[in-house]
Amino acid sequence: MAIAHELAAQQREISVSEFFAKNRHLLGFDNKKKALLTTIKEAVDNSLDACEEADILPEISVEVIDMQNDRFRIIVEDNGPGIVKKQIPNIFAKLLYGSKFHRMRQSRGQQGIGISASVMYAQLTTGRSAKITSKIGQREQAHYYELHINVQKNSPEIAKEDVVEWKKERGTRVELDIEASYSAGNQSVDEYLKQTAIANPSCTIIYTNPKAEQVIFPRVSSEQPKKPKEIKPHPYGVELGVLMNMLRFSDDRTIHSFLINEFSKVGGEAAKQILENAAIPPQSKPREMSREMIERLVEGIKRTKIQNPPTDCLSPIGQDLIEKGLRKEINAEFYASVTRSPAVYRGNPFQIEVGIAYGGTQPADQPIRIMRFANRVPLLYQQSACAVTKSIIQTAWRGYGLEQSQGAVPAGPCTLMVHMASVWVPFTSESKEAIAHYPEIIREIKLAVQEAGRRLSIYVNKKRRVADQQERVSIFENYIPEVADALARLSGAGKEKIIAAMRKMLEKNKEYIQAHKEAHQVEERKEEQARLGGFEDE
Amino acid sequence: MAIAHELAAQQREISVSEFFAKNRHLLGFDNKKKALLTTIKEAVDNSLDACEEADILPEISVEVIDMQNDRFRIIVEDNGPGIVKKQIPNIFAKLLYGSKFHRMRQSRGQQGIGISASVMYAQLTTGRSAKITSKIGQREQAHYYELHINVQKNSPEIAKEDVVEWKKERGTRVELDIEASYSAGNQSVDEYLKQTAIANPSCTIIYTNPKAEQVIFPRVSSEQPKKPKEIKPHPYGVELGVLMNMLRFSDDRTIHSFLINEFSKVGGEAAKQILENAAIPPQSKPREMSREMIERLVEGIKRTKIQNPPTDCLSPIGQDLIEKGLRKEINAEFYASVTRSPAVYRGNPFQIEVGIAYGGTQPADQPIRIMRFANRVPLLYQQSACAVTKSIIQTAWRGYGLEQSQGAVPAGPCTLMVHMASVWVPFTSESKEAIAHYPEIIREIKLAVQEAGRRLSIYVNKKRRVADQQERVSIFENYIPEVADALARLSGAGKEKIIAAMRKMLEKNKEYIQAHKEAHQVEERKEEQARLGGFEDE
């Protein structure tokens, strides 16, 4: 028998759950510490998305209970819209299932993997099912499920199903037991929640850590960010294969109406233009177009001038709230923020925001602190692999008053916050820890960072001038006795008198500098106000 | 109506093809240059795996045809066992389908994604179907398929199906049209094929590049590496959830026989031990065990001493062939290689090999060249994210005679090759470009690299001693005239005579050094031979 037959016998389908169970490091479960963060992150991100969808001011409670020997119980509860009964199993116990993937609109989740992956990790490490409670309205019942994933089939299995009493008006509660380890610091749950509060000012988080200490992050703004709108794809950046697929299943009668109905920013005139440039008759039937015609269509699109995509699909944090957030969390002397106007990569609208906090109690002799956010979610791992870091390294910081050695992150008492808002953030892995290096994205980050840098340099330079003056004065002060001595010998005048005179002179000088310094600060503040008022981006 | 119902209406399944089409950078298709490499890599890796399975000496032809405006036609043809008719569509046009994922045995492919991803990329960028021809034996028919992927369903669609004439005895031929760009250099197809030849000495590759130039990499060894054996999982590192799953579907009558049948290195005695340590009666029925019992079982396994996993599932390249490969490709003065004995991470056996080539025509003022391999496949991207690079950076190279600045790759005229062979290589992404940072893996790489470093230092130091001597001599030479002058004046003897005498003296000295030098080299060679003969790893 041909060897090929033996091989054929071994060929079989691999379920996406099996794949990720074996590759769980791709999902952010590569070690116990990270597993704790990832699990909480997925649950909180979903809660925030759900509240945003329903225009509800989020109030989320996160509880982490230490069950000993590396076991932790995680309970995340929100006041969101809740989940309808029949969807609960799929949403929590089926990978690649969700509402956000097929939609062009900014949201934290996009893959339909996250929370199910956490459920799978719980199952792998503790063998316990996920406990879900959800209620969609005052007069509705609260549904309780115990779920696990059939890994071979990537389908939910219901261990228990019940109707329970829940005083809450509506919301969802997730309880998971996982193998994990807890520690504070840079990449901890604490840090993630703190940064989440900065990027989501309208959200209140009540956090109970494994030591049973409660930390509350109250909302700093009581207006929910305006809900981003869903958009259609933009013709630029649409790929041949994707277009073929759209046409094949299109119900539009003509290619002309197809272009108008399926894409954003394509009106009758633009559609006509495209078809002319593609040498395709406007009446052609979408389903009947040949590969060659579609190829011409793609060329036609490239050759036609079309408006940029709409940007109401994005919900940036805003300069004002970024600065508020930084002031709340970081004790610095100088704050500034920049929000770029939206741009496009591969047909996806995106927008970059930057906040900077300088001086104060921040350490001066270390690399600056970088805070990365994607669609308001803090990114705590893989900093060096991220487009944000690359852009910061490629910026010349010496000119802005920070130390920087070749190819390194600048050093100084400074925190730099960068936020990318987009309908589709291209991550370097499913664990969503770093942004991929698309040139358009790097360019925008650089421009925003440079603008923040320029603001910083103005402040730093003034500060330096004043400092220099003070130094000159104090040096002079040190020499007074000798100078006085000399003068006394030369002039024959009394040394004490001369010293007194000189001190007096000095005092005046000091007052002058002090006055100057305050003037500087007032000025600084004025400028800041002005900027916060209505800074216009180039 | 509750908002939850609106949301529910949008919930739907996401096919794995849709997911990767949108995330194609995860599969190595993030830019045109890389797309060319990835496509060829996936096809060649499959051919090599297939030949290995069938104990056939691989002869693979790779043809890249430039079709203008960033379109390339890629044709990869092998002399492998071929693929049975009914499997062809699934293997080439369905993601997550294959024979290697569920099996514990070293192979290049492991995910069941690669080649279908290339087919999908071709379809996305050029809209053309993949053209596959395969024949499984002399007296069999050759089958021809034109395939594309139904992205919504992640299932193959057959555009054309035929029986064709193919003089070849057996083999498979893949033809894909993709959007790509070609350039030579570090991360090029040329480099990939060159390194593939080094790591696969029994393989012959005939490569026709886009300039229609043919390059042939002939096999340097005509014995096929011994085919790795498939093994069962080792009890250490088996996760609770996985174990629960195994038990649930087990046909074994007792837990005792289950342990013996389902795991490697577990005999009657070990099984008995485990169950004692877990306080579980040996006659318990696998299907009826509670979560608590299974948890005790995991603990029991941890507390029982069990032999290391078998290692005939691995197929290292071997010190001898590594050195042969390096000598063939790199013009250096000194070569050495190290093969560690196998180790285990998360229950997976793996083995590290290192080759080093120093001096010769290699540039002295740049970082050393690092060649990374996983299961004989060259890794050309994401060097900085790879466990190999991390291990090299964390090694102190000054002691081994190379320059190295804090936290950097060492510099010097040197090439370092590192190979990881394993039943499951943990990659940092589906594109399989970098090895994840598992501590056990990093430890092994370091130990191997250090051993190579020690060998290097012996050579470098001897070289240095000789060089110093020569320098002293030539310095003396420069001073001859003056010294002679002085002597002449003092002794009254003729200057010419004195110079002649001194030169004579010098010549002797030089001969002496030369002799010495040769002696050193002979010695070196002897030592090398000895090592290649039977170097024993600590």
Image: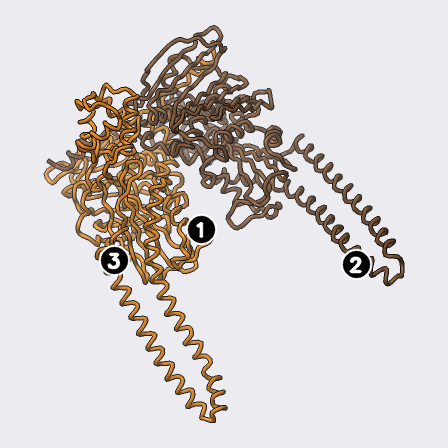
Chain colours: A brown, B orange
Please state which amino acid type lies under the numbered disc 1: Ala
In this rendering, the answer to whether B427 lies above or below A283 is below
Q: Nearer the viewer, mark 1 or mark 3?
A: 3
Please state which amino acid type lies under the numbered disc 2: Glu
Q: Nearer the viewer, residue A9 or B207?
A: A9
Secondary structure state at the residue bearing disc 2 = helix
In the drawing, does residue B86 fall left or right of residue A86?
left
Secondary structure state at the residue bearing disc 3 = helix
Q: Position of residue B284 (x, y in %)?
A: 21, 21
Q: Earlier in the sequence, mark 1 or mark 3?
A: 1
Q: Chain of mark 2?
A: A
Q: Tell me if residue B113 can be seen.
A: yes
Q: Identify the residue under disc 3.
A: B531
Q: Position of residue A319 (x, y in %)?
A: 61, 31
In the drawing, does residue B240 fall left or right of residue A477?
left
Q: Quadrant of residue A434?
A: top left
Q: Chain of mark 3?
A: B
Q: Nearer the viewer, residue B26 or B155?
A: B26
In this rendering, the answer to whether B433 lies above or below B501 is above
- Mark 2 and mark 1 in contact? Answer it, CB < 8 Å: no
Distance (Cα) linking label 1 and label 3: 30 Å
The dot on residue A482 is 2
Q: Nearer the viewer, residue A442 or A109?
A: A109
Q: Tell me if residue A287 can be seen.
A: no
Q: Nearer the viewer, mark 2 or mark 1?
A: 2
Q: Which residue is located at x 33 percent, y 74 percent? A: B514
The dot on residue A287 is none
Q: Chain of mark 1?
A: B
In this rendering, the answer to whether A243 lies above or below A171 is below
Q: Identify the residue under disc 1.
A: B408
Q: Which residue is located at x 66 percent, y 31 percent? A: A532
In this rendering, the answer to whether A168 lies above or below A205 is above
